[in-house]
Amino acid sequence: MVEMTLIYEGELRSTATHGPSGTTLTADAPVDNHGRGESFSPTDLLATALGSCMLTYIGLAANKHDWDVRGTKLTVKKEMVADPLRRIGRLIVDIKLNKPFDDHDVMILTNAVNTCPVKLSISEKIQVPITFV
């Protein structure tokens, strides 16, 4: 079990500390939700966690097949909805591989990103279209 400690700093901002490493990050409410928008919002962090998890699983698949995937770039576009409450509606993922891969290898990488723990933990209410470029 990993423990994170969060402290509310006021003005819709919090600081999180990663227990094992002591690394900290700040989360700030976005401007359109009464915050300053000076750092990742909590929903931005979910989108970031998804992208990071997917890249980790691409790396794990690559290690298994002795592929070099350094330089692979992933972008996540977050779309918010209000139905009736404000929430994430879609996380659009585009993955630009560092070099051409054949269809079979892309299928292996697709399976890897679809089985990362963050993707598996996201509600079915959130659409997660994934495109490999």
Image (cartoon, rainbow, N blue to C red):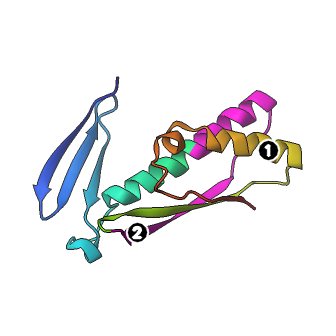
Q: Residues within 10 Å of mark 1 (few under 14, many from 20)?
A: few
Please give left or right for residue 43 compared with residue 128 in the image.
left
Q: Position of residue 110 (x, y in %)?
A: 72, 46
Between 42 and 16, the one nearer to me in the picture: 42
Residue 65 image offset from top left, x and y in percent? 80, 31
Name which quarter of the figure residue 18 lies in.
top left
* Left or right placement of residue 19 versus residue 13 in this view: right
Q: Which residue is mark 2?
A: 80
In the rendered image of this protein, does residue 109 appear above or below residue 36? above
Image point (61%, 57%), residue name: 74
**Image position, residue 56 (x, y; %):** 59, 39
> Disc 2 on helix, strand or loop?
strand
What residue occupies the far left of the structure in this picture?
A: 10
In front of the other: 5 or 80: 80
Name the residue nearer the viewer: 11 or 71. Answer: 11
Specify the amino acid type for callout 2.
Met
Task: Please name the residue that numbered disc 1 is placed on.
Answer: 107
Where is 60 relative to 52, above or below?
above
- Would you place residue 1 above or below residue 70 in this image? above
Q: Secondary structure at mark 1?
A: helix
Name the quadrant of the N terminus. top left
* Residue that appears at 25% across and 62% down: 28
Q: Residue at x 17, y 62 (%)?
A: 12
Nearer to us in this view, 105 or 88: 88
**Mark toward the start of the polypeptide (1 vs 2):** 2
**Label 2 neighbour load within 10 Å: few <14, some 14-19, many 20+:** some
Q: Are marks 1 and 2 in contact (CB under 8 Å)?
A: no
Query: Label 1, label 2: how many angstroms apart (C-alpha)?
Result: 29 Å
Provide the residue span drawn in magenta: 54-83
Name the amino acid, label 1: Met
